[in-house]
């Protein structure tokens, strides 16, 4: 899977987040514009992979079967609107378990890379937290987009205090998708121009 891979966080990016965790489908609400954004990225040839911390599993608040059912319903709704999620990687661990997959560690992205042969320098991570941005940096992703939905506003302030900047700050996933599509178009033009100038 070369190029055009977009890693997406889930809560606060695709659906509304909750301090009490999203534990069942009836609590899952798509953020306005997120379904259209996924559709547009899919139609443009991007492969979308979900990368999400889901510690509610090991906190005993939700079972693996309940999480998988929620993801099945989510992907069905996405397909119904013309989009597609290539794969879902989730970390069920609590922070105190010190696993290798919980963001900001890059374990889930590295697992996706190993499974699909992804060139991470050509990939983009979209998230609403400083952890998402750090995860993308740790993995070597070529682009990092912070959305201001979910925890985005406070994350932007935190990143500013730490003198760390994402490549783009988007109002929401729809805005992020437009930036990603423009970026891909500009990169394609640059490649064409480079080929034209070859001896």
Image (cartoon, helix red, strand yellow):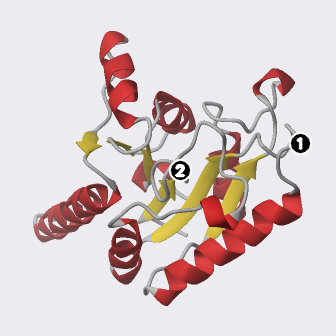
Density class for disc 1 (Cα within 10 Å; few <14, some 14-19, many ≥20) is few
* Residue at 38% from the left image edge and 78% from the top image edge: 39
Q: Position of residue 179 (x, y in %)?
A: 23, 57
Q: Which mark is residue 150?
A: none
Vertical arrangement, residue 84 with respect to residue 82, above or below = above
Q: Position of residue 6 (x, y in %)?
A: 45, 59
User: Answer yes or no: do the residues labelled 1 and 2 have beta carbons within 8 Å?
Assistant: no
| Quarter the C terminus occupies | bottom left
Residue in the foreground of this view, choosing between 34 and 47? 34
Total marks shown come to 2
For disc 1, the marked residue is 60
Density class for disc 2 (Cα within 10 Å; few <14, some 14-19, many ≥20) is many
For disc 2, the marked residue is 9
Q: Is residue 96 left or right of residue 2?
A: right
Q: Is residue 187 left or right of residue 121?
A: left
Q: Is residue 154 left or right of residue 48?
A: left
Q: Is residue 117 visible in this depiction of the protein? A: no
- Whole-angstrom CA distance, mark 1 to mark 2, is 22 Å
Q: Secondary structure at mark 1?
A: loop
The quadrant where residue 104 appears: top right
Residue in the foreground of this view, choosing between 183 and 48? 48
Residue in the foreground of this view, choosing between 3 and 160? 160
């Amino acid at each position: 899977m070369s190029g055009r891979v977009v890693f997406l966080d889930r809560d606060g990016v695709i659906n509304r987040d909750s301090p009490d965790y999203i534990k069942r489908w009836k609590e899952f609400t798509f953020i306005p514009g997120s379904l259209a954004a996924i559709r547009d990225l899919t139609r443009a040839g991007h492969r979308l992979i979900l990368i999400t911390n889901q510690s509610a599993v090991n906190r005993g608040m939700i079972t693996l079967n309940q999480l998988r059912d929620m993801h099945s319903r989510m992907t069905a709704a996405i397909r119904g609107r013309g989009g597609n999620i290539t794969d879902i990687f989730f970390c069920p661990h609590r922070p105190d378990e010190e696993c290798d997959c919980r963001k900001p560690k890059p374990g889930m992205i590295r697992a996706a890379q190993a499974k699909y042969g992804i060139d991470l320098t050509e990939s983009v991570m979209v998230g609403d937290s400083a952890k998402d941005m750090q995860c993308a940096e740790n993995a070597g992703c070529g682009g990092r987009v912070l959305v201001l939905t979910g925890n985005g506003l406070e994350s932007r302030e935190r990143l500013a205090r730490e003198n760390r900047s994402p490549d783009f700050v988007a109002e929401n996933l729809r805005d992020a998708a437009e930036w990603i599509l423009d970026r891909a178009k500009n990169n394609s033009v640059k490649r064409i121009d480079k080929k034209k100038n070859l001896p």
